[in-house]
Structure formats: structure tokens, C-alpha cells
Image (spheres, grey):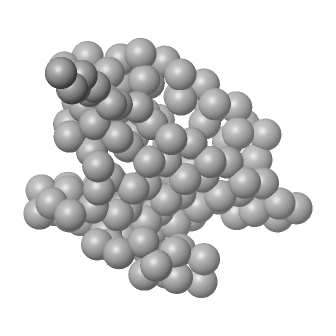
Amino acid sequence: MAVKIKEHGIGIAIKKGKSKLFVELTMIGKLTHDDYQVFVPMIDKALKEAKGLDTKLLIDMRNFKGWEIRASWDDLKFGVKHRNDFRKMAIIGDKKWEEISIEMMDHLSKGKMKFFKERDKALEWLLD
């Protein structure tokens, strides 16, 4: 009998150089409040230490399945808190609602935000 595992979580890569901070988040499965309890402090710390640096964010949502209710609130709080912390944000996804929500959020952010279906194109734009 095969065991079905519900994989969920947020993969995090934080790369800091002399003048740049690059953050990559990979959203997997249906996110929980506990997922946000783990990754938010890491991002908060990296951004606090990166004051004055050129900050960029890549979010890969291709394996994202949504949020539990409390996690959706966590996501909204995170987005509002950090909407002006990144100069450029590239979001990779494959769903129309993701693309539309990014277009709407772009107007609420100081930095540029763009939706992509392919990782290579997102990185090319982001690192330009």
C-alpha cells in the first residue's frame, strides 16, 4: 500500500552580495500557518540586515496549491509588510488568477512586479 504524503512548505534561498540581496521562495502544496512561522522571521532578518542594498525577489508558485485559512491571513500580512522592500519581484506561476493578482498588486508596490510562466525568463528580467 502506497502512503500518500501531502507535501507543503516554502523553500528559501537568500543570497547576499556587497550591494545586492536576492531572495527566492518556492511555494509547495497547501501552505499552513506553521510554514509562515518558519520562513517570515528569516526574510525579516535578511531584509533588516540588507538596508540600502538592491533587493530582488523571485517567487515560484508552480507547485503551489493554496493556503489554509490562517495561512492566507499570514500571506496578506507578509505582502503588506514587505510590498516596498524589493526593487523587483518576479513571480513564476501557471494559473490565470496568479497572473491577475500580480497585475493588481503591482500598483500597490513601490518596486516593479511581473508574472512569468518560465523560470529562465523571470530570472532574465529580474537580474537585468
Pinpoint residue 107: horizontal percent, then vertical percent. Answer: 30, 62
Pinpoint residue 91: horizontal percent, then vertical percent. Answer: 37, 61
Q: Residue furthest left?
A: 96
For the residue pair 127 and 104, the one nearer the viewer reads as: 127
For the residue pair 104 and 128, the one nearer the viewer reads as: 128
Does 96 sit left or right of 60 as displayed? left
Pinpoint residue 70: horizontal percent, then vertical percent. Answer: 26, 16
For the N terminus, the image quarter is top left
Pinpoint residue 23: horizontal percent, then vertical percent. Answer: 60, 52
Does 75 sit left or right of 36 as displayed? left
Image height of 82 relative to 94, above or below: above
For the residue pair 112 and 26, the one nearer the viewer reads as: 26
- Residue at image coords 35%, 17%: 33
Quarter of the rendering containing residue 53 = bottom right
Q: Is residue 38 visible?
A: yes
Quarter of the rendering containing residue 19 = bottom right
Q: Is residue 110 visible?
A: no
- Residue at image coords 35%, 75%: 118
In this rendering, the count of numbered labels is 0
For the C terminus, the image quarter is bottom right
Image height of 49 relative to 123, above or below: above
Quarter of the rendering containing residue 80 = top left
Q: Residue furthest right?
A: 18
